Image (cartoon, rainbow, N blue to C red):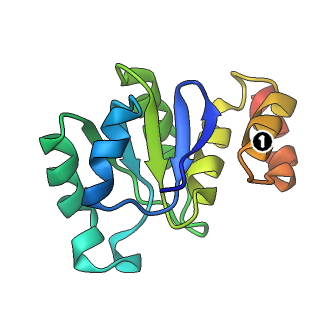
Amino acid sequence: MDIRKITDSYAVSPQIAPEDLPDIVAAGFRTVICNRPDDEVPMELQAETLRIATEAAGLTFIDNPVTHAGLNPAMVELQKQALDDSDGPVLAYCASGNRSSIVWSLGQAGTLPVDEIIEATSRAGYDLSRLRPMLEAADRS
């Protein structure tokens, strides 16, 4: 499992599986966010299967399927709200961790400085510098 820390309270990873949950719990995560649409994965990795396994492991599960073409403000707000409501660190996953980094970045615009957002995702291996204009526009809103 390739967990990449963005902040002390938020990390991202590629697709997880039920057998990864003991390690996720041991790492201290309290909430898992699925940013991967079900049509991208086989039945055994779909959101409802992972919801059942995640909740059985004592964690909160949030389903927020994100596509690059379909990313919208409601998805950004749900991601931000899940992070705000969590009683501990959050792990979000998608195919590679990139979408989970993007949706987090958009939710932090106006809260964190744009340079800090881009640096945090870059340290984790996700170059989101192309989002700078969008982050700056949101920061001024």
Q: Residues within 10 Å of mark 1 (few under 14, many from 20)?
A: few
For residue 82, side relative to residue 111 (left or right)? left
Give the quarter of the image for residue 105. Answer: top right
In the rendered view, tell whether residue 113 sits above or below residue 39. Answer: above
Give the quarter of the image for residue 90. Answer: top left
Residue occupying image coordinates x 12% and y 43%: 56
Residue occupying image coordinates x 56% and y 51%: 100
In the rendered view of the protein, which quadrant contains the C terminus?
top right
Give x and y (percent) for residue 42. Answer: 30, 80
Give x and y (percent) for residue 20. Answer: 33, 54
In the rendered view, tell whether residue 84 sits above or below residue 114. Answer: above
For residue 103, side relative to residue 56 (left or right)? right
For residue 85, side relative to residue 121 (left or right)? left
Give x and y (percent) for residue 140. Answer: 81, 27
Provide the residue designation for mark 1: 123
Which SS class for mark 1? helix
Tag count in the figure?
A: 1
Residue occupying image coordinates x 41% and y 34%: 27
Residue occupying image coordinates x 54% and y 33%: 10
Give x and y (percent) for residue 33. Answer: 39, 46
For residue 98, side relative to residue 86 (left or right)? right
Which residue is at the front of the view, 70 or 95? 95
Q: What residue type is labelled 1?
A: Arg
